[in-house]
Image: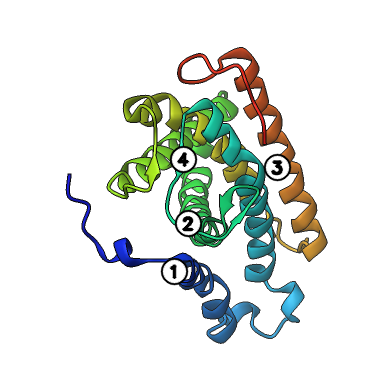
C-alpha cells in the first residue's frame, strides 16, 4: 500500500511542531480574542483557563499512563520518529490537547441542549438512565470516530484493526464516559465559579476514575490475543 504523504519526510522536530500547531490555538485564540462576558475577569477566573487546565491534566494522564493500556490490550503502537516520554511520543501529548478540547467543547453543547430541552425536563422518571445512555453513546461514538478517521495514518498501528474499531472503541470510550459529564461541571452553576485549583482537582479525580475502570477492564476482560502481561 502506498502511504505517500508529507508526513513521510517528518522527523522528530516536525511532529513536535505539528503538535504545537494543534495545541496552541486552544490557548492563543481565547486569550487574544476573549469571550466578551468574561474578558474583564482576572485571567485565572476566566472559563477558558479553567477548562484548559482540566483538559491538559486529563490529556497528560491519558498519554503518560493510559496509552500503555492500548499498547498492551489492543496491540497498538506508534512507529513514527518522535521524542518520547514514557515511550509515548511528545507530539501526542500536544495533539491530544487539541483533540480533547474540541471533543469536550462540542459535547458540552450537546449535553446542555439535552438537559435543558423541554422533553427531558418533562420526564417524571428515568432522567439518570437517559443521561447515562446518552453519555455512553456519545463517548463510544467519539472514540470510534477518532480511531476510524486516523486509520489512514500508517504509523499508528494495531495488531487487529477490526478489534480496535469495535472493542477498542469501547475501551477508549471509558475516557469520555467519565470525562464528558465531569468536564461539563466546570463553572456550570451560576454564581459559583470554580477556581483553577477546583478544575485541577476535578481533572485528577476524573483521571483516577478512568484509571480504575481501565484496570478493571484489564483484569476482567483482557485484550487482543488474551494479553495477560502489563507494564508501563
First of labels 2, 1 by sequence position: 1
From mark 4 to mark 2, how far is it between C-alphas?
A: 19 Å
Q: Which residue is mark 2?
A: 99
Between disc 3 and disc 4, the foreground one is: 4
First of labels 3, 2 by sequence position: 2
First of labels 4, 2 by sequence position: 4
First of labels 3, 1 by sequence position: 1
Vertical placement of residue 48 versus 4, above or below: below
Quadrant containing the C terminus is: top right
Q: Residue at x 44, y 39 (%)?
A: 143
Q: Position of residue 81 (x, y in %)?
A: 45, 57
Which label belongs to residue 151?
Answer: none
Residue 154 lies left or right of residue 48; in this view the side is: left
From mark 3 to mark 4, how far is it between C-alphas?
A: 25 Å
Q: Which residue is mark 4?
A: 77
From mark 2 to mark 1, how far is it between C-alphas?
A: 13 Å
Q: Position of residue 219 (x, y in %)?
A: 65, 16
Amino acid at each position: 500500500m502506498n502511504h505517500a504523504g508529507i508526513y513521510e519526510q517528518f522527523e522528530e522536530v516536525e511532529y513536535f511542531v505539528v503538535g504545537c500547531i494543534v495545541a496552541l490555538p486552544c490557548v492563543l485564540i481565547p486569550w487574544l480574542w476573549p469571550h466578551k462576558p468574561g474578558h474583564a475577569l482576572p485571567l485565572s477566573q476566566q472559563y477558558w483557563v479553567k477548562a484548559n487546565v482540566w483538559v491538559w491534566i486529563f490529556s497528560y494522564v491519558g498519554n503518560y499512563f493510559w496509552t500503555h493500556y492500548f499498547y498492551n490490550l489492543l496491540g497498538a503502537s506508534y512507529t513514527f520518529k518522535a521524542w518520547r516520554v514514557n515511550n509515548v511520543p511528545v507530539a501526542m501529548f500536544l495533539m491530544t490537547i487539541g483533540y480533547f478540547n474540541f471533543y469536550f467543547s462540542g459535547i458540552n453543547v450537546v449535553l446542555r441542549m439535552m438537559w435543558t430541552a423541554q422533553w427531558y425536563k418533562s420526564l417524571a422518571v428515568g432522567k439518570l438512565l437517559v443521561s447515562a445512555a446518552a453519555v455512553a453513546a456519545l463517548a463510544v461514538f467519539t472514540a470510534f470516530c477518532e480511531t476510524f478517521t486516523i486509520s489512514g495514518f500508517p504509523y499508528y498501528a494495531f495488531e487487529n484493526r477490526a478489534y480496535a474499531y469495535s472493542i477498542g472503541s469501547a475501551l477508549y470510550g471509558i475516557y469520555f464516559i467519565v470525562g464528558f459529564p465531569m468536564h461539563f461541571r466546570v463553572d456550570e452553576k451560576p454564581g459559583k465559579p470554580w477556581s483553577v485549583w477546583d478544575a485541577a482537582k476535578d481533572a485528577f479525580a476524573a483521571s483516577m476514575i478512568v484509571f480504575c475502570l481501565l484496570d478493571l477492564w484489564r483484569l476482567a476482560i483482557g485484550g487482543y490475543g488474551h494479553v495477560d502481561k502489563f507494564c508501563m
